[in-house]
Amino acid sequence: MSDFQRNTPDDHVIDKMSHDRYLRTGRSSRSRIKILGLGVTLGVTLLVLMVVSIYSASKISSLSGEKMDLERKLVTAEQEINTLNPKLEKTRTELNDLVQSRFPNLQPLTINNMLEINEGLIKQVVFTKIKQGKQDIYKYLVVVENAAIKKINPSFRVLLFDEFGVHVGSADVVDKRVLEAGESRDYTAELELLFETTPKHFYIEDLSANYSSLVN
């Protein structure tokens, strides 16, 4: 038997061992590449998370500073309002007293309250305010009573004034219907304002004596 034939089995064993070693080396290389890829991905993810965390912390710190600044401004504004409120009330009272001294017949105008007048023909009045778009509409309801022993024609004028005593609106009523002695009647209508303002005072003038000739 030749040397070539005798060495053939050993050669096969060597080849098989080399092949196994090659396979193990290939699998090991792929595993290392896979691990390296995962490591790179993890590193990039951690880096992104770090950047996001730093940005979020900076943003939160900035918002917290703005919030504290706004809170300080709010406290300052509230303190100023609390300081000004008594002064404003005092000014309003002084202004109201001044108007009343100059125009003693004027009365404070309140909304949705039955106000007792009891002067001549006029017994009571109620003022109401209706919101119509951006405009405030003022209406009145006046109750009159004939306390005399003769017939009369109810006639009166409702006058409105602002906080400075300036005339800002009015409404006139001349009723040709006779009001018997002891009889009462009520009238309601919209008040015409001369310009856009808020009425603060009113006066109702009894004009019945001026129209006594209308009575049959």
Image (cartoon, grey):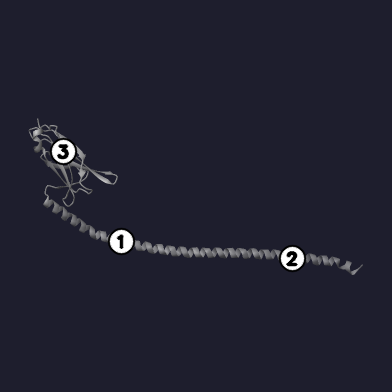
Which label sits in the foreground, 2 or 3?
Answer: 3
Which label sits in the foreground, 3 or 1?
Answer: 3
Q: Are marks 3 and 1 in contact (CB under 8 Å)?
A: no
Near-viewer residue (31 or 109): 109
Rendering quarter of residue 172: top left
Q: Circle 1 sits on which residue? A: 75
Residue 108 in percent (x, y) is at 17, 48
- How many numbered circles does the render carry? 3
Q: CA distance from mark 1 to mark 2?
A: 79 Å
Give the residue type at disc 2. Answer: Tyr
Give the residue type at disc 3. Answer: Val
Numbered disc 1: secondary structure: helix
Q: Are marks 2 and 3 in contact (CB under 8 Å)?
A: no
Residue 196 in percent (x, y) is at 23, 48
Q: Circle 2 sits on which residue? A: 22
Looking at this view, name the residue that lies furthest to the left: 149
Residue 42 in percent (x, y) is at 57, 63
Q: CA distance from mark 2 to mark 3?
A: 117 Å
Looking at this view, name the residue that lies furthest to the front: 194
Residue 212 in percent (x, y) is at 8, 35
What residue lies at 34% left-to-right and 61% top-to-bottom? 71
What residue lies at 41% left-to-right and 64% top-to-bottom? 62
Residue 185 visible to the viewer = yes
Q: Circle 3 sits on which residue? A: 173
What residue lies at 53% left-to-right and 63% top-to-bottom? 48
Residue 147 visible to the viewer = no
